[in-house]
Amino acid sequence: MDLKTFEAGAWAVLQEAASDPQAGFRYLTLCTVDALVQPQARTVVLRQCADDHRMLTFHTDVRSPKWQEMAANPQVTVLGYCHQRRLQLRLAGRVECYAAGSDVSRKAWRALPQHTRQTYTGGPPGDARTTANEAPDPTAAETGESRFGVVIVRVSVLDAYQLQRNENQRALFHYSSMGALQESKWLNP
Ligand SMILES: Cc1cc2nc3c(=O)[nH]c(=O)nc-3n(C[C@H](O)[C@H](O)[C@H](O)COP(=O)(O)O)c2cc1C
């Protein structure tokens, strides 16, 4: 395999995962650094992948701690492993965060199904509650949009690792801020 094929394959599987809930890279780990310089990681759903611009899109609640963490420090790492393909992708980059009122969030909100919108109608993520399940507030339906945020990661480095019996392969790819491939090289796995 050559570097070009390896890189194209990595982006193709991400692209695929953005529209396939069953795909291995559908659920990715988004890592931020908090105000105490503690690394933070959580699972997020890959909503879009603009592979030509090396951009990944996620949705979140702007009241969740990660939103403030990314506002203070936009450098993030996204990690995924597809068991079926035996492929690990580690993507480092900068986020752009779009809160309610922005064209980006308005457009994304319009495309969300009702049950997904519902997830933004509860209390602030991470706040304490008294029971495991709280009755949904029927009047809260419209307020979800004000809490909905879109996170776009512009990837600057991709570290791709293919597990293969006896011949693991690993390569590093660097991108410009516009997503142009600037450098690629094989690494020792
Ligand atoms: C399978 C799965 C998918 C999730 N998808 C998202 C998501 O797309 N966006 C999101 O903000 N949180 C998602 N979560 C919840 C986060 O993992 C996390 O618990 C929550 O956003 C609070 O994160 P924070 O406290 O680091 O801000 C998901 C959790 C699971 C288990």
Image: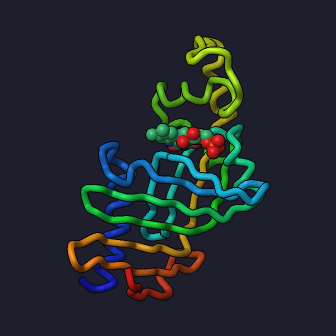
Task: Please determine whether, in this image, residue 151 is positioned above or below residue 7.
Answer: above
| Position of residue 36 measured from the top left corner of the image (x, y, whole percent) | 78, 55
Left or right of residue 23, residue 66 in this image = right
Which percent across, then down, holds residue 13?
32, 61
Camera-side residue of 131 and 58: 131
Looking at the picture, how far across and down is residue 5, in whole percent? Answer: 28, 79
In terms of image quarters, where does ligand 1 lie? top right
Q: Is residue 112 left or right of residue 12?
A: right
Q: Nearer the viewer, residue 46 or 85?
A: 85
Q: Is residue 106 visible?
A: no
Q: Quadrant of residue 99?
A: top right
Residue 181 visible somewhere in the drawing: yes
Question: For residue 153, what is the image quadrant?
Answer: bottom right
Residue at (46%, 80%) from the top-left corner? 173
Q: Nearer the viewer, residue 58 or 172?
A: 172
> Measured along the vertical axis of the image, is residue 86 above or below residue 131?
below
- Please identify the quadrant where the N terminus is shown: bottom left
- Percent position of residue 186, x then y: 38, 87
Q: Is residue 167 above or below residue 89?
A: below
Residue extending farthest to the front is 166
In this figure, what is the number of numbered marks? 0
Residue drawn where x is 37% and y is 54% of the image: 25
In the image, 100: left or right of 136? right
Q: Residue at x 53, y 49 (%)?
A: 58
Residue 9, by quadrant, is: bottom left
What residue appears at the point 28 percent right and 63 percent down from the top-left corner?
A: 86
